[in-house]
Image: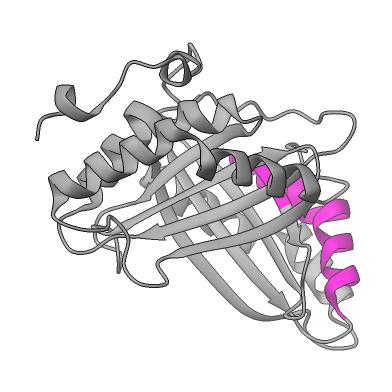
Amino acid sequence: MTRRQFVHRSAATLLLPAAVRAEGAGRCYELRVYAAHPGKLDALNARFRDHTCALFKKHGMTNGGYFMPVENAERKLVYFLLYADRAARDASWKAFMADPDWKRAAAASEKDGPLVAKVESQMLETTDFSPECKLERKTPERVFEWRTYTTPAKLLPNLLERFRGNTCGLFTKHGMTNVIYWTLASGQPGADVTLTYLLAHASAEAAAASFKAFRADPEWTRVREASEKAAGGSLTVADGVKSVMMVPTDYSPLA
């Protein structure tokens, strides 16, 4: 089945943002997740607030969004950075790690023990349908949802086509804000089967109401069924959709 056969140019599709290329499209993004040691999350946030973010900027990195999960038993801090390209990323981190100001800040913050138990990092690329990611704080403060989809082998293009042609527009129709959409940079585990993205909502309750309306929308039912028929099955593996509700930190450029 072709795109023309299952992509309906509905009102929802027409609600896609006019700027369909993400700000800095072609730039390099890095999503980092830190798990703090017990009792150290406040100190970790203080170090970012008072030192780390400014030092990132000093060394050519662009601070994106900084968030903490609403349910945060693992004491996580989730954030993303922007770079001109991968070479710039590597040069920036090398200079940052060698900076005496960073070494002093790290040593002072860790006088009673290290703050971070685990660091995870993913290099990301924006999709061609990702909206412009505006790094701005809004009032009242929003909640953000980090969603990750894993597809069966060879079906990531089908999932991307469904988001490009319909899903993003339907999200907008039902009151959600598309923030940014990424795939993993090539060479990383799961790069050929993973879509990860951020949505913004007025509240957790608003998020639940929006998704309830989205899933009940006849247009979504038609699109899902047509796309799955074309692909020969579901576009996500079993348990292949993960969602994390997050709140921005007080120092996050995106809130």
Q: Quadrant of the C terminus?
A: top right
Would you say the magenta stretch is mainly helix, strand or loop? helix
122 and 91: which one is in front? Answer: 122
Above or below, 57 relative to 177: below
Does the rendering let one see residue 28?
Answer: yes
Q: Is residue 58 magenta?
A: yes
Residue located at (59% from left, 53% from top): 146
Rendered image quadrant of residue 163: top left
Would you identify the image quadrant in which residue 43 lies?
Answer: bottom right
Q: Residue at x 68, y 30 (%)?
A: 135
Q: How many numbered callouts?
A: 0
In-image side of 230 versus 150 (left or right): left
Asked whether 60 or 213 is in front, the reply is 213
Q: Position of residue 167 (x, y in %)?
A: 42, 35
x, y percentage for residue 92?
53, 49
Image position, residue 226 (x, y; %): 23, 40
Magenta segment boundaries in residue numbering: 40-66
Which of 157/106 is in front?
Answer: 157
Q: Residue furthest left?
A: 1
**Screen quadrant of the N terminus:** top left
Q: Nearer the viewer, residue 165 or 247?
A: 165
Instruction: Report the side of 174 relative to 250 (left or right).
Output: left
* Residue occupying image coordinates x 38% and y 29%: 166
Give the answer, above or below, for where 5 lies relative to 38. Answer: above
Horizontal and vertical percent position of residue 30: 50, 52
Figure colour scheme: one colour
Viewer can see residue 26:
no
Viewed as shown, does residue 93 lie left or right of 90? right
Q: Is residue 6 magenta?
A: no
The residue drawn where x is 77% and y is 80% is 73
